[in-house]
Amino acid sequence: MIQPTSVFLKAQPKLQNRSQSYQYLIKMLDAFFVRVKVDTSLPQDAMRDEFDLYLIDSTNTDWKDLLPAELVQLAKQNSVVIFNADADAICEKNLLLNGIKGVFFAEQSPEDIFSGLVRVINGELFFSRKSISTTFNHMLYAMSRSQFSASNDSVNNDIDLSLLTKREKSVIHLLAQGASNRDIAERLNISDHTVKTHLYSAFKKTSSRNRVELANWAQSYMAVSLSLQNTQ
């Protein structure tokens, strides 16, 4: 059963010549849903509740280890589905753990995507059974570890943000958005070596072992979804 639904499709920029399948999918959405909006940028925060479902194009993205902070924040408040995914550039377990409702791969037909979207709208997850089982086992393990850590006073996730310098916070913000070291260096007008120095310091201060842990920490404890215009 198809419920009255408004859909926002976030397309990738600079993909002017979209495939016929892509265009056909948009026509199917227009035909069956109350409202469909296609744009290369997400709506402003105050307007995001206007849409029941967000369909995010992941063409030419590498989300194997880390999802953009903006996407993580969106999934906390809204139903989000990924499409045009590359199996080698995405991790279904990470998507599930971050609240994504489903994923469709580039080789799937518009009809398959539409059928899956209907299931998502009706409250189902659209992932492989193996991925759901793996994620469930991961969550059970994490819960058991969390209960152990809660009784161990040496474990403390409440990092004092004042320990981080302004530049370290800027680097962490950009890292959590999925930026590479080179991207961060260009954005902040600093050298690659300086970026590594700030990251090393941030690793120590947040007890993070690598970039993924630091980004996950940032997405939990910092307002990484805010505008990055003031991170210079």
Image: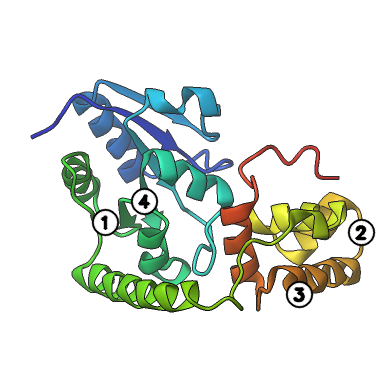
- In the rendered structure, which disc, 2 or 4, sits on the residue that comes first in sequence? 4
| Residue 178 in view (yes/no) | no
Q: Would you name the residue on which mark 4 appears?
A: 83
Query: Do callouts 1 and 4 mark residues in contact (Cβ within 8 Å)?
Result: yes
Q: Which residue is mark 3?
A: 204
Which sits in the foreground, 37 or 80?
Answer: 80
Say if mark 3 contacts mark 1, CB within 8 Å.
Answer: no
Residue at 71% in and 52% down: 173
Q: CA distance from mark 1 to mark 4?
A: 9 Å
Q: Nearer the viewer, mark 3 or mark 1?
A: 3
Left or right: where does residue 71 sit relative to residue 132? right
Residue 46, horizontal then vertical, whole percent:
52, 23
Q: CA distance from mark 3 to mark 2?
A: 21 Å
Residue 170 seen by the camera: yes
Q: Earlier in the sequence, mark 1 or mark 4?
A: 4
Crowding at mark 4 (Cα within 10 Å: few <14, some 14-19, many 20+): some
Marked residue nearer the N-terminal end (3 or 2): 2
For marks 4 and 3 on the same chain, the one whose residue lies earlier in the sequence: 4
Q: Which residue is mark 1?
A: 108
Q: Mark 3 is on which residue type?
A: Lys
* Quarter of the view holding residue 147: bottom left
- Which amino acid type corresponds to the residue marked 4 in the rendered image? Phe
- Between tags 4 and 3, which lies in front? 3
Q: Nearer the viewer, residue 19 or 164?
A: 164
